[in-house]
Amino acid sequence: MRQLIYNSEKIQKSSRVDAETKQKARPVQIFDSLQVNKLTSKQNLNIFNSYDNIKFDIWDNGKEDGDIINLYQNDKLILENYSLTKAKKSLVVKLDPKENIFKIVALNEGSDFPNTAMIEFQGDSKVELVSHLKKGETAFITILNKKN
């Protein structure tokens, strides 16, 4: 760990390293991403799980501003025109034995850009993510069964 921080400091000070590479080499960002995963347009987050069902909570963790989403599981609509609020909406979903693709579609951006949905999956472990989407954009969460 000490070597990682030292190398990161050298990268940050170097004039031969471009800004994008410097941004990727920041250890604080790497560790923060392990806490809450940020999901943007067309991104996919893979989660491994061995349970037959998964519980998840979905809510607006920022300013409650009228964000509305659709949520699909394997192209089947499970939340339609859902208005995100501070109150957590809890769902228990039966998983397909092979693969489950959850799709979040932002139907608007509310009064405060962008559309943000906080989602907490609880299966083998707890995974938290927040989507940051413009109107019409989509992000994906794929839950893969560890038993297969």
Image (cartoon, helix red, strand yellow):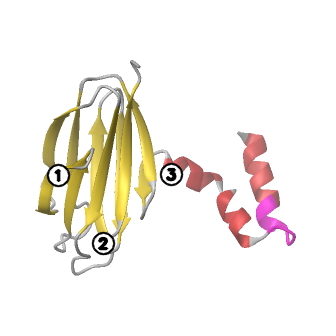
Q: Give the range drawn in magenta.
A: 11-17
Which element carries disc 1, helix, strand or loop?
Answer: strand
x and y percentages locating residue 45 in the rendered image? 43, 47
Which element carries disc 2, helix, strand or loop?
Answer: loop
Give the mark nearest the N terminus, 3 or 1. 3
Q: Quadrant of residue 15?
A: bottom right
x and y percentages locating residue 28 in the rendered image? 59, 54
Q: Do the residues labelled 1 and 2 touch (CB within 8 Å)?
A: no
Marks 3 and 1, how far apart in space? 31 Å
Marks 3 and 2, how far apart in space? 27 Å
Give the mark nearest the N terminus, 1 or 2. 1
Task: Please identify, in this view, whether the residue under mark 3 or under mark 2 is nearer the observer.
Answer: 2
* Apparent side of residue 37 relative to residue 94 in the rendered image (left or right): right
Q: Which amino acid does label 2 sit on?
A: Gly
Identify which residue is drawn at 45% across, 57% down. 43
Q: Name the residue under label 2.
A: 136
Number of other residues with Cα within 10 Å of mark 1, as a class: few under 14, some 14 to 19, many 20 or more: few
Give the mark nearest the N terminus, 3 or 2. 3
Identify which residue is drawn at 77% across, 58% down. 9
x and y percentages locating residue 23 in the rendered image? 66, 64
Q: Report the front residue among 36 and 75.
A: 75
Task: Please identify, in this view, whether the residue under mark 3 or under mark 1 is nearer the observer.
Answer: 1
Q: Report the front residue among 60 and 95.
A: 95
List the single residue furthest toward the right.
Answer: 16
Q: Name the residue under label 1.
A: 77
* Apparent side of residue 80 relative to residue 58 in the rendered image (left or right): left
Q: Mark 3 points at which residue?
A: 32
Identify which residue is drawn at 30% across, 53% down. 103
Q: Do the residues labelled 3 and 1 touch (CB within 8 Å)?
A: no
Number of other residues with Cα within 10 Å of mark 2, as a class: few under 14, some 14 to 19, many 20 or more: some
Number of other residues with Cα within 10 Å of mark 3, as a class: few under 14, some 14 to 19, many 20 or more: few
